[in-house]
Amino acid sequence: MYVVWVASSLMTAREVREVCAELRNHPELIEAIEQEAKAKLVNMKKAASPTLTAS
């Protein structure tokens, strides 16, 4: 599984390694982050949609 991690602020190499290790040890965190991102994307697409569509 490939995971792309986008940092909103600059992080040191040590901080990046710590975050990666945490996510590697707890795959459920990755799933929670992914579900949250998908929900935000769906909401953004719905808000940007100029026409009515069936869900």
Image: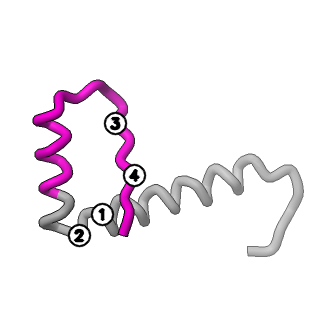
Determine if the magenta segment contains residue 18: yes
Please, which residue is most extreme toward the top here? 10
Q: Position of residue 44 (x, y in %)?
A: 63, 50
Q: Would you name the residue on which mark 4 appears?
A: 4
Q: Would you name the residue on which mark 1 appears?
A: 30
Of the pair 47 and 21, the residue shown nearer to us: 21
Q: Where is residue 36 in the image (x, y as percent from the top left)?
A: 42, 59
Tag 2 secondary structure: helix
| Point 35% across, 47% down: residue | 5
| Disc 2 crowd, CA 10 A, few/some/many (<14, 14-19, 20+) | few
| Point 18% across, 63% down: residue | 24
Amino acid type at mark 2: Pro
Q: Would you name the residue on which mark 2 appears?
A: 27
Vertical placement of 1 versus 11: above or below?
below
- Are the residues flagged by discs 4 and 3 in contact, CB closer than 8 Å? no
| Point 17% across, 47% down: residue | 19
The magenta stretch is 1-22
Per the model, the C-alpha gap separating discs 3 and 1 is 15 Å
| Point 13% across, 55% down: residue | 21
Of the pair 35 and 55, the residue shown nearer to us: 35
Vertical placement of 39 versus 9: above or below?
below
Q: Nearer the viewer, mark 4 or mark 3?
A: 4
- Are the residues flagged by discs 2 and 4 in contact, CB closer than 8 Å? no
Amino acid type at mark 3: Ala
Per the model, the C-alpha gap separating discs 2 and 1 is 5 Å
